[in-house]
Amino acid sequence: MLGFALRRVTVGLATLVAVTLLMFLSVSALPGDQCSASLGRTATEGALARCRQEISGQGNIAVRYVRWTASAMTGDLGTSHVRKEPVAAALAPRLFNTFVLASVAAGIAFPLAIVLGVLAALRRDQAVDIGLPTLTLIGMTVPEFVSATMLVLVFSIWLGWLPGISMIPPDAPISRILPVIATPALALAFISMAHTMRMVRSCTIDVLESCYVHMARLRGVPERLVVWRHVLPNAMLPAIGIIALQFATLLAGVVVIKVVFNYPGLGRLTMDAISNRDLPLVLGIAATLAAIYVAVTLVADLLMFALNPRLRTVRS
Amino acid sequence: MSAACALSVSSLSVRLSRPDGEPRFILRDIGFALDRGETLGIVGESGCGKSTLLAAMLGSIGKGLQIGTGSIRLDGREIVGIDRQQLEHLRGRQIALVPQNAAQTLTPSLTIGRHFEEQLALKTDLPAAARRERAAELVATMRLPDPAAVLARYPHQLSGGQQQRIGIALALAGQPSVLLLDEPTTALDVTTKLAILDLLREIGAQEKLAMIYVSHDIGVIACMSDRIGVVYAGELVEEAQALVLLNSPRHPYAAGLLASVPRMEAQTMPEALPGTPPGPRPASAYCAFSPRCARATGLCRTQWPAQTQLTPEHRLACHHPLEPFGLRPDRPASIATIRQTANGAIQAPDIPLITVESLEIAYRKRSLADFTRGRTPQATVSDVSFTVAPGEVLGLIGESGSGKSTILRSIAGLLAPRHGEMRFAGQVLADNVACRSPDQRGRIQMIYQNPDDSLNPRQSVRQIIQRPLIWFRGLKGAELDAEVKALVDTVRLPARHAERRPGELSGGEKQRVAIARALAARPSLLLCDEITSALDVSVQAAILGLLDELRRETNVAMLFVSHDMAVIRHIADRIVILQAGRICEAGATGTIMAHPSHPYSASLIAAACGYDAYFR
């Protein structure tokens, strides 16, 4: 177990280094440079030259990457040119908001996806199993900005039950976040549930058709116990990986939805950073998102390892 | 049939549940009765309905099938048509199944102890504390060492033999009166198999179980059964006491099946049974076996043979049965026998075709960790040397994991040995097949165990055979067509099969295609990896006969890998016995069979001879 965990952590760190290095290189390779980007089109030649001088004084790209990495490890991701504040300070409250939103969406999506996925598998080829996938197919294929807009239209404008956009500052306390979170969380949950449910269904069907489930029935184990004891534990193992990936997507991806709802999370910050050419901020966000992906998959791998006796125990 | 019977089945039919058209039957008019303490063996080729019969007795015939007529009574109680709850109650308590492949039938997320706990809680009245004890007791009955440790393990932590024992113990947990055994030893090694069979016989007698033992392995059926039923195309064509049926079968199918079994003591080649069983058929008005039967007459093709009672214990459905003890036709002597009587003991020839010297093979390469700790990964095969002469068949025998197939893979150039040298026709053979000359590649050809995996399902037989002809011999046009035709003919397939795809052929036909493909390159050495193990005995006999003829016609040498001593005995001039990757004995077939000098070879031979005792 320890060896496996160590190997996994090492691979995770290596991934992180590779991603940040790639980001660092591509940011450097962009047409125009940090200086022209941050100083804007009206910058004088003199100002640009001063700025460039300052940067080249920091050494070549390798030295700058090592420095950046070293300070990133202490929590210092540099300073945003546009916002004139440390990148970490801009990130922290939005990261927290995103985490709250993703957790609420996950809390709705995953339990529902598991229950419905298993149900569809158990009632295979019956009405439930034909209806649900059709519904989820819609969830997966309709572009997210459409489904998000539809939700706003239905719940906020027609019904007036929920606020349409989030009019809160990034550093609002959680008590102010929760009331406005419902619509974006629902939109996110809908998409995430669609993917997860389909995977849970197919994992469950695989297990239902396995020899050991058939044999449990032939031993005279009642159907209820067959499902709870023999099917679910084995079907949920591969589902953990899928759920983890979906959760990472909820945290790091789906930028558009967060923009539609004007939610003060990482998504909107990313859009702002990119359109302002705020390169230190872009770099900081990319590193954070990569770290989230790596961390979530790491946790999922360790969880799967701990729950799967085939991996946990050595063959004797 | 008395109510005292543990199990009685009468006029049972199972058919495909199609709403329209003529009903097609998987099982038709099956009837038998079984008392406690009795074992009925059921034999037949694959596809004859053996598994469906077992499934019907468990009330689980699967989707798409339905019970047409008939009744199945367990201790006098009808089980056809009862609801799911009642079935769940019966299963494991009155009737239990020992499955074929125990490894796949144990739930991977539960420990062995949890399996027993579940079964004992559901099927017995024991209190929780007593259940643990009872589980340990059941495991101990299976002669597994340290029951407590076994119960704490997960299924994947046990060996195949141990898993099979657990499968049996689980079936016995609810103290059923009827035990169904579905080929429970097929996946096991000879020695493990014998131990399990002994155990089953002992437990059957002790618990007075009524057992139904289904297998296509007639040897196993012979040692297990009091009575034997022969199933063909879903019908019970003959049923008699075991010794009567084994020595004096009256139905031509039963006789053909028995003649195709390779035997240790017989001086004759096993005899093939031509043709294949039909699929689900309508309730037709003719004998299902007549298309394959040498004795069939017009009567057989127009009238369905009803079952007749020869003696109170011998039932038969045939218009033209064999005479009692009619099964002694003059069969051709097996090749090994002919050669040995002609030349005395066969000497290792002077000019070998292939020489293998001190071969050592490991699947795992030395890793960095191995280097730093100064260790070498375990070799799968070590210090193996042998030669094969032109036209000679060398048998490689051993249990699974003894390294037989590994050696073949190395000779084929698919797995580089760690040490050792291979010489082919006087030249050094490169480790990697890509480094060998086209001539060497063509002259060494491999045939795999399972033709389903080794033939491309999307190509026709013609395309499959053409490939090596074009590649190795540069044939084209009319010449190519003629050669394909000749090869199809060589492996005794009808010419029209050339246009078929593997999916349209039977298992035996597919293996013939694989052989034709190997022959296309005009090989001097055929590497045969368990090429008959996936086939029915009747088909196995035909393939063995074919290989023997091919050898005489083309003087091709063979390295024939098998775990079955009786098969090897009929085909090989010399044998090499492997144990845990090392040669434990090598020599002429006849000599080793008569005087094995290593205890391991002796036990392998004894295990294979075990069955012969029943054919007397």
Image: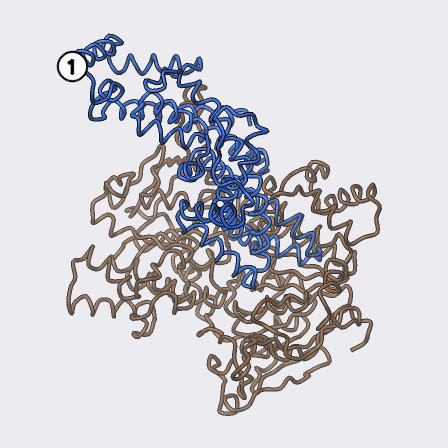
A176 in relation to A140, above or below: above
The residue sitting at 47% across, 54% down in the picture is: B590
Residue flagged by tag 1: what amino acid is it? Glu
Residue placed farthest to the top in the image? A57
The residue sitting at 59% across, 77% down in the picture is: B235
Chain B display color: brown
Give percent across and percent down for residue A246: 48, 40
Give percent across and percent down for residue B366: 40, 27
Q: Quadrant of the N terminus of chain A?
A: top right
Residue bearing the label numbered 1? A45
The one of B558 and A64 positioned closer to us in this rendering: A64
The answer to whether residue B594 is left or right of residue A78 is: right
Q: Chain of mark 1?
A: A
The one of B315 and A270 positioned closer to us in this rendering: A270
The answer to whether residue A230 is left or right of residue A150 is: right
The one of A315 and A195 positioned closer to us in this rendering: A195
B16 in relation to B287, above or below: above
Chain A display color: blue
The answer to whether residue B420 is left or right of residue B586 is: left
Q: Residues within 10 Å of mark 1 (few under 14, many from 20)?
A: few
Looking at the image, how many numbered discs can be counted on the residues? Answer: 1
The answer to whether residue B279 is left or right of residue B125 is: left
A55 in relation to B521, above or below: above
Specify whether residue B574 is in view.
no
Specify whether residue A188 is in view.
yes
Give percent across and percent down for residue B20: 53, 82
Secondary-structure class at tag 1: helix
Give percent across and percent down for residue B175: 78, 56
Q: Quadrant of the C terminus of chain A?
A: top right
